[in-house]
């Protein structure tokens, strides 16, 4: 009898408690990226695991996360088991405790004794401690203290738990409004007000109706909401201790004295806001940090510095304070901090000052006195963020800032020199470098040497074709000729450019003793007498133990985006290599997500961007989800000292490159393609509403690949064998245009590159070019052996064949193909940075011809719509932000609009 096929997966986890109450979860056999998304399937609070704290191969989870993860719906096809007896026990405890946590009657089984939460439920003692810790953490996250809890328990028992926004009505919002005294009056007004969700105007009954029951005081359009307004008002006043209303069947309205207002603001405001109720305050009370308290500090040094020799000098800080325009002493400021006051009265006005912020300023003052920050730490923003951001001109122009940070004039001049990459100590170019450096390449050499001397990693991120290779070779010659180094330098590069490194080193620096660590015949031992060892990412992964045993003179990653996926074994292993200096070379510092930028910086200067969890919170979420310009700017400031990037468009480089023309070639779908296209769209859209977030992303990415292949040719989509070339051209206008254009270019004696993402498309183009034009066009793919790849590149440069087909990913980096005067993109990549990399195989130094770039787009399809969106998103690449996965983050409505087919 045939047994039914099981589609259920089981992940075995090891679970260990930590001293701080959190938990470590890891799997010995399954990569982290496989099981974490399944565990966070329904966890919206962490963006379905995006904010999960990951350290190496381990998940660090809080008690609240454990409660929330195990109280939700389990994955339909995946189960989690314990790897050992303790882990199995913990899983049982999590599930039992989660049942208590998710029970609406939770606060009926909790009591508070001496600020300690006691759990009275039928679970073991460990589970009770877990629930208590989770409750305490949830309260702290909302900004509530344990002393607030006794008065909140009735509220929690009546549906106020879990803590969330109380503005749950779809049409109406109920709020409490505090109004300041009218002119010549001395009493404040506290009242219940309402507004429609689509309105910004609050409403309260006219005077003649204030004493009527709520249902009679409301306008007719809101009569149906009377019970909701009454219930919400009762909830609000059940939490207020500073006011005791005698009647809540009417709209609350009462006058308060200054003292009563002070108590309300002190005792009740924060609590009400933390529990999700809307409180309307006077405008001047809302602006927490636009108060009359201002702080200013000036950083200076004991001497005037004119060179980088002063980078290790200690900074001194002068602090000054003012309140309502009047200077106050540091003692008076300290007294305000000690009193922990949030509101002060000056004359007849109340001003709100942020007590927590003032404590932060005091901590800054203590740190500046005790931690001895240096000019170097100032340069690399290794000082508190409040000071670091103020160093930037764009930030310092804010009017009337609450906190001002200034630099002594001579120090400011030094900082500008260093930030603008000027004034580095000169470096003499080795006589053994058999080429002449351009001025900007000389600057690159001096910058790399300066960063080495100051023990800072470096990311050389010049545009493709600007000579990153020769700048590094000049640097290596300097290091191994001028310094007393005991070990070789290491270069790790993709296999596709290994031959290029060998040739460039032999051509420009034959004096360097180079060992190539690659191939099946390689020895595992490293020649420590060599100046330089070159290997590939794959080989480095295989031989990581022997490579990690050496502290290299320098470690350089070429095409450093190869370590972008930080969770892969290759990326983790390479980031653990040690050298006196770490350098990353890349033409695109960020190819996809900001996590890739973190990986590169974790290699060149470990710890500089903090843990990945902190980087997610501080940058990834506000930039990739909220598109925050402020956080982009903050990140740019943070990475700028480590990053040297020049582009071909920079007039200071004086490259004198020939012109480049980019042209879109629009093609219509054939009738066959259109019918298949619309059928696939309808089938996919009908499924979107039924899928979870992760399933939806998977479906979208799968569908995108199918659509793009269909736009190329229906035979690729249907997986049909190839017919005669003329018949194949009739079924796809795009194919016909590409083949015809390529044939015409070859007939004129010119050469062209054709890039495609799909192996099938490359073979189809080969088939048609051979039959119709008798052109044998080689196709370079990722599986092609290195020797064959190098031979084809040399042959194309020698004009031995006119058309070169390349896989976009395999041929998009590290190749010099300046013999081409045309670049054809058969199918569009959703990330312009990747396309631009490919184009730069031809448009680079050494190119003497006008370069014509042709981008083929099928009309009315997703290709055309994405192209329009990419034009709008192109600026993101310049901000070091560009994700080829952004399309999966679109809303359902935007996605359906994107997928609609326009004939």
Image (cartoon, grey):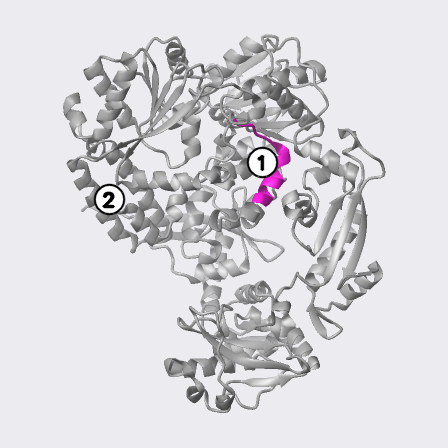
On residue 601, which mark appears? 1
Q: Is residue 269 magenta?
A: no
SS category of the residue bearing label 1 = helix
Asked if residue 52 can be seen in this view, the reply is no
Q: Position of residue 257 (x, y in %)?
A: 68, 83
The crowding category of the residue bearing disc 1, from other C-alpha atoms within 10 Å (few below 14, some 14 to 19, many at least 20), is many
Which residue is under mark 2?
902
Q: Position of residue 705 (x, y in %)?
A: 30, 37
Considering depth in this image, is 490 or 442 the residue closer to the camera?
442
Which residue is drawn at the image coordinates 70% and 44% (left, top)? 383
Instruction: State the CA–CA distance, disc 1 to disc 2.
Output: 44 Å
812 horizontally vs 644: left or right: left
- Mark with earlier residue (1, 2): 1
Q: Main secondary structure of the magenta part?
A: helix
- Number of marks drawn: 2
Q: Is residue 646 magenta?
A: yes
Q: Position of residue 844 (x, y in %)?
A: 47, 20
């Amino acid at each position: 009898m045939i047994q039914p096929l099981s589609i259920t997966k089981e992940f075995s986890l090891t679970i260990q408690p930590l001293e701080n109450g959190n938990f470590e979860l890891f799997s010995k056999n399954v990569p982290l990226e496989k099981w974490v998304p399944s565990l966070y399937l329904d966890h919206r609070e962490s963006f379905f695991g995006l904010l999960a704290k990951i350290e190496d191969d381990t998940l660090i989870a809080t008690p609240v996360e454990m409660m929330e993860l195990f109280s939700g719906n389990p994955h339909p096809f995946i189960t989690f088991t314990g790897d050992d007896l303790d882990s199995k026990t913990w899983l049982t405890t999590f599930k039992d405790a989660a049942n208590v946590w998710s029970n609406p009657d939770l606060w009926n089984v909790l009591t508070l004794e001496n600020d300690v939460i006691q759990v009275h439920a039928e679970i073991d003692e460990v589970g009770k401690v877990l629930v208590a810790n989770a409750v305490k953490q949830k309260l702290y996250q909302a900004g509530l203290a344990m002393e607030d809890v006794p008065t909140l328990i009735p509220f929690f028992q009546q549906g106020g738990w879990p803590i969330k926004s109380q503005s749950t009505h779809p049409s109406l919002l109920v709020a409490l409004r505090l109004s300041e005294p009218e002119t010549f009056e001395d009493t404040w007004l506290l009242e219940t007000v309402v507004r429609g969700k689509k309105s910004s105007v609050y409403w309260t009954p006219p005077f003649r109706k204030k004493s009527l029951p709520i249902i009679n005081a409301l306008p007719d359009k809101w009569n149906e909401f009377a019970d909701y307004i009454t219930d919400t008002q009762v909830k609000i006043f059940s939490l207020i201790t500073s006011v005791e209303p005698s009647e809540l069947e009417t709209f609350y309205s009462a006058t308060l004295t200054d003292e009563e207002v002070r108590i309300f603001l002190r005792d009740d405001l924060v609590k009400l806001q933390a529990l999700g109720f809307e409180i309307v305050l006077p405008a001047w009370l809302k602006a927490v940090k636009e108060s009359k308290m201002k702080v200013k500090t000036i950083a200076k040094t004991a001497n005037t510095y004119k060179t980088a020799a002063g980078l290790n000098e200690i900074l001194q800080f002068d602090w000054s304070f003012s309140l309502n325009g009047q200077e106050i002493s540091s003692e008076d400021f300290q007294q305000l901090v000690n009193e922990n006051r949030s509101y002060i009265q000056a004359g007849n006005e109340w001003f709100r000052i942020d007590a927590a912020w003032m404590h932060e300023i005091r901590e800054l003052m203590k740190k500046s006195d005790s931690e001895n920050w240096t000019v170097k730490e100032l340069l690399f923003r290794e000082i508190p963020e409040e000071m670091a951001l103020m160093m930037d001109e764009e930030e310092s122009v804010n009017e009337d800032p609450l906190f001002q940070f200034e630099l002594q004039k001579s120090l400011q001049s030094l900082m500008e020199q260093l930030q603008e990459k000027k004034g580095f100590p000169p470096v003499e170019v080795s006589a053994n470098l058999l080429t002449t450096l351009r001025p900007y390449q000389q600057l690159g050499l001096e910058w790399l040497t300066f960063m080495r001397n100051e023990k800072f990693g470096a990311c050389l991120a010049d545009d493709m074709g600007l000579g990153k290779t020769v700048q590094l070779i000049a640097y290596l010659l300097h290091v191994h000729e001028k310094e007393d180094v005991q070990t070789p330098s290491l270069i790790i590069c993709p296999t596709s450019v290994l031959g290029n490194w060998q040739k460039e080193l032999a051509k420009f620096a034959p004096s360097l003793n180079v060992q190539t660590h690659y191939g099946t015949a390689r020895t595992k031992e490293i020649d420590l007498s060599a100046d330089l060892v070159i290997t590939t990412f794959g080989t480095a992964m295989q031989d990581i133990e022997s490579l990690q045993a050496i502290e290299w003179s320098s470690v350089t990653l070429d095409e450093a985006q190869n370590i972008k996926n930080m969770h892969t074994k290759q990326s983790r292993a390479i980031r653990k290599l040690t050298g006196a200096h770490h350098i990353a070379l890349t033409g695109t510092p960020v190819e996809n997500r900001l996590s890739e930028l973190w990986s590169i910086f974790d290699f060149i200067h470990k710890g500089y961007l903090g843990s990945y969890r902190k980087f997610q919170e501080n940058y990834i979420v506000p930039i990739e989800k909220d598109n925050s310009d402020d956080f982009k700017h903050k990140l740019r400031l943070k990475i700028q000292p480590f990053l040297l990037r020049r582009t071909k468009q920079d007039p200071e480089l004086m490259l004198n490159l020939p012109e480049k023309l980019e042209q879109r070639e629009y093609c219509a779908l054939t009738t066959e393609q259109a019918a298949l296209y619309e059928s696939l769209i309808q089938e996919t859209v009908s499924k979107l509403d039924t899928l979870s977030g992760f399933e939806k992303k998977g479906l979208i990415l799968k569908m995108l690949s199918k659509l793009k292949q269909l736009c190329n040719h229906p035979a690729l989509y249907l997986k049909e064998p190839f017919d005669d070339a003329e018949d194949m051209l009739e079924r796809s206008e795009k194919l016909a245009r590409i083949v015809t254009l390529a044939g015409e270019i070859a007939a004129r004696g010119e050469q062209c590159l054709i890039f495609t993402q799909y192996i099938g498309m490359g073979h189809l183009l080969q088939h048609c070019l051979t039959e119709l034009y008798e052109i044998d066009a080689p196709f370079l793919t990722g599986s092609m052996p290195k020797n064959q790849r190098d031979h084809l590149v040399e042959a194309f440069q020698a004009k031995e064949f006119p058309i070169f087909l390349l896989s976009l990913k395999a041929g998009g980096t590290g190749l010099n193909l300046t013999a081409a005067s045309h670049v054809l993109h058969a199918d569009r990549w959703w990330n312009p940075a990747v396309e631009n990399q490919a184009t730069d195989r031809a448009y680079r130094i050494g190119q003497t011809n006008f370069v014509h770039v042709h981008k083929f787009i099928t009309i009315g399809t997703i290709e055309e719509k994405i192209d329009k969106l990419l034009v709008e998103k192109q600026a993101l690449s310049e901000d070091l932000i560009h994700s080829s996965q952004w399309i999966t983050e679109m809303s359902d409505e935007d996605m359906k609009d994107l997928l609609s087919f326009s004939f």
